[in-house]
Image (cartoon, grey):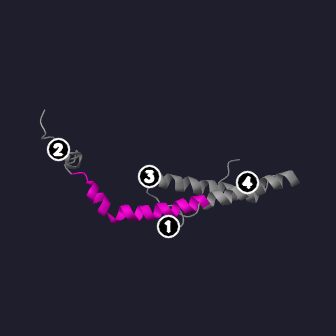
Amino acid sequence: MTDNNPTVDQVETEGGDKRPTMEDNLKSPSTWLRLGYMIVYCVLIWLAILVGSVVVALGFLWLLFTGKVNEELKQVGQRLAAYTYQIARYLTFNTEQKPFPFGAPFPPAETEE
């Protein structure tokens, strides 16, 4: 065994490019900008869940007193669910598309009938 093996930072990829080092990642403005967006989206998803909880409570009370589902609340709930899904995908690095308000428009109410 020799100690001449390259470190993980020095290994070249198949295309011949060197992978960025941890130092490169720490100095990258895009890394820190993404952290800022992620913090904002964490606050927004918390607010969306809070508003969604109010919508759930109001929807149940509406059903309790009228016997019918409130279609407007149903659509608001659907839009909030789609929005939280978009944020979760961005926060978990499954997409680079930023949700509303910094990227995609607020999702429409597409209900399944």
| Residue corresponding to mark 4 | 56
**Residue 90 pos. (x, y %):** 48, 55
- Between disc 4 and disc 1, the foreground one is 4
Q: Amino acid at mark 4?
A: Val
Cα separation, mark 3 vs mark 2, equals 29 Å
Disc 4: CA contacts within 10 A as few (<14), some (14-19) or many (>=20): some
Disc 3: CA contacts within 10 A as few (<14), some (14-19) or many (>=20): few
Give the SS element for disc 1: loop
The disc, 1 or 3, on the residue closer to the chain's N-terminal end is 3
| Residue corresponding to mark 2 | 6
Q: Which mark is residue 93?
A: 3
| Residue corresponding to mark 1 | 102
**Residue 11 pos. (x, y %):** 20, 46
Cα separation, mark 2 vs mark 4, equals 56 Å
Cα separation, mark 3 vs mark 4, equals 29 Å
Span colored in magenta: 18-46
Q: Is residue 109 visible?
A: no
The disc, 4 or 1, on the residue closer to the chain's N-terminal end is 4
Cα separation, mark 4 vs mark 1, equals 27 Å
- Between disc 1 and disc 2, the foreground one is 2
The disc, 3 or 2, on the residue closer to the chain's N-terminal end is 2
Quarter where residue 108 is shown: bottom right
Circles 1 and 2, Cβ within 8 Å, touching? The answer is no
Give the SS element for disc 4: helix
